[in-house]
Image (cartoon, rainbow, N blue to C red):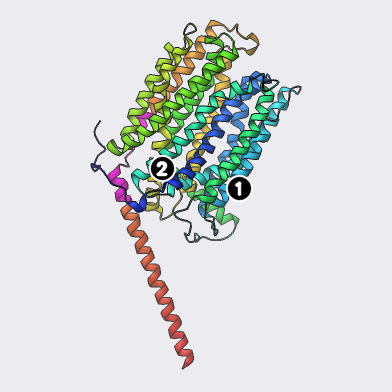
Amino acid sequence: MQQEKNQPARHITAREDCVPIFQKAIYSIGGLVNSLQAAALGAMVIVLNIGLGVNPALVGLVGAIPRIIDAISDPVTGYFSDNFRSKWGRRRPVIFFGAITGGLFYALMFQLYKGHSEMFYFWYFAGFQILYFLGFTCFSIPWIALGYEMTPDYHERTRLQGASNFIGQIAWVVAPWFFKIMDNKSMFTDIVHGARILSIALGAFIVVGGILPAIFNKERFHDLPKPQREKGPWNITKDFFRGFAITFKCRPFVKLCAVTFLIFNGFMLASAFSAYVIFFYVYHGDYSKGGTLLGWFGSFSSICTFCVIFLATWLSTKIGKRNTFIITISISIIGYALKWIGYNPNRPYLLLIAAPFIAFGLGSLFTLVGSMVADVCDLDELKTETRREGMFGAVYWWMVKLGLAVSSLLSGILLNATGFNIALGANQTAKALLYMRLCDIGIPIATSLAAIFIIMTFDISEAKAYDIRKQIERRREERRSEERRSEERREEERRREERRREV
């Protein structure tokens, strides 16, 4: 594939633009926390259905309800982080608070016991999940924004996002084993008991790992002057919605949101079916064997993703981020198609042949798109003269979460539509098993194809990104020069006034 239009053969990152190894490592631990909570929640929520007998549609709904809160909390947190000023910076104090509250509410969310009604479980889980997301948003949104601003270099941004996703991928290696751990009869009385204990351990990790970026990472724009705006709740509200609207008017950013929405949530929607296909089609209701295969498939996929992250980071410096994205997502489509062959009751582990190909999807998605969003933030500063990484990060991840809510809701509805009935156990109908496989394979293929067509129109190339950077840095220097001249004029006026008083 040809290099992006007007892209130089190779750009060498300046030493002052490189993020030190220690800073990358600490930021990447935050990536592990961010990934682990998402992977763990997706792996553990199945306890509501299999462990407590909650209807799949209600399980899907309980995952969708908190996203309504996210629709408000994410942009508000991003706006607050962009405009907050303290001696510790704009992002770090909010990250510190979010890590502690997020970890606490994650542990409380799974403190469930048998013997209650279906609606009790629904409202308990929904309530604590809302509190959890409100708390964890205060960690995730400023942490994401911090990553966008840590370097201004086109390629170093990809390297930073690649390092973060590389370490974060550890979560997706271990999370597929969470069902196996919760269902371990030698450790826990049942899967519900296992979920209670596991959630406490994970909550503690969120707290400890989450506060590290708040303590050790450095902010590039920590000393920005406080924005000049009219005071009062009404004026702040108007400024918030004005910024929110401007964010959605940025067409390159909207395209990145769309492709992420399609690929990530197509994958998550399919994943909801994968467990059921393995349990009930491949292993005819044997949770122990199914959990083992699910664990190996997830872990092998995640190990392959480590390689994909490294490859995508390297390849993007050669042919550009957009072209790399098109190649990697196309490869992942092949992997989804191979799952049709891999779901074989006679040879269950044939499913592993699809894993290396599927890994190209998520392995490249957040590495490349996260870096591309940082480039969009520069374009936004060129147009608005404001650094708004928090708002862009908030809106971007709100779109991801909105997609998760949609996939959570649709997964329960579609699972019921296939004819699946948990009461039938291993005796599911052939029609239900067929429809579950079709959903598992067909949905991510369709969403990935749509994403490729959208990303083909993304036009911030390497050459354009560096041109934007030169313009904004020149304008910053002009602004600083003007501020110095203004200060000198004020100082001269002060001296004249003193001399007049002396006379």
Is 473 on the left or on the right of 243, as rendered? left
Q: Which residue is mark 1?
A: 97
In the image, what residue type sits under mark 2? Leu
Q: Residue at x 49, y 32 (%)?
A: 170
Q: Secondary structure at mark 1?
A: helix
- Nearer the observer: mark 2 or 1; the answer is 2
Q: Residue at x 51, y 24 (%)?
A: 269
Using the numbered discs, state the Cα–Cα distance from disc 2 to disc 1 in whole angstroms: 24 Å
Q: Residues within 10 Å of mark 1 (few under 14, many from 20)?
A: some
Q: Secondary structure at mark 2?
A: helix
Q: In the rendered structure, which disc, 2 or 1, sits on the residue that comes first in sequence?
A: 1
Q: Nearer the viewer, residue 358 or 19?
A: 19
Residue 222 coordinates in the image, percent (x, y): 48, 56
Q: Which residue is mark 2?
A: 160
Give the residues drawn in magenta, as a range: 451-468
Q: Quadrant of residue 491?
A: bottom left
Is any part of residue 127 visible from this angle? no
- In the displayed image of the protein, which residue is found farthest to the right? 115
Does the magenta portion include 452?
yes
From this view, report whether residue 467 is shown above or below residue 127.
below
Residue 146 coordinates in the image, percent (x, y): 47, 48
Q: Nearer the viewer, residue 177 or 457?
A: 177
Residue 453 coordinates in the image, percent (x, y): 35, 29
Q: Residue at x 30, y 49 (%)?
A: 466
Is 414 on the left or on the right of 477, as rendered? right
Magenta stretch, overall SS: helix
Residue 274 coordinates in the image, percent (x, y): 51, 18
Q: Nearer the viewer, residue 229 or 332?
A: 332
In the image, what residue type sits under mark 1? Phe
Q: Residues within 10 Å of mark 2 (few under 14, many from 20)?
A: many
Does the magenta portion include 251?
no
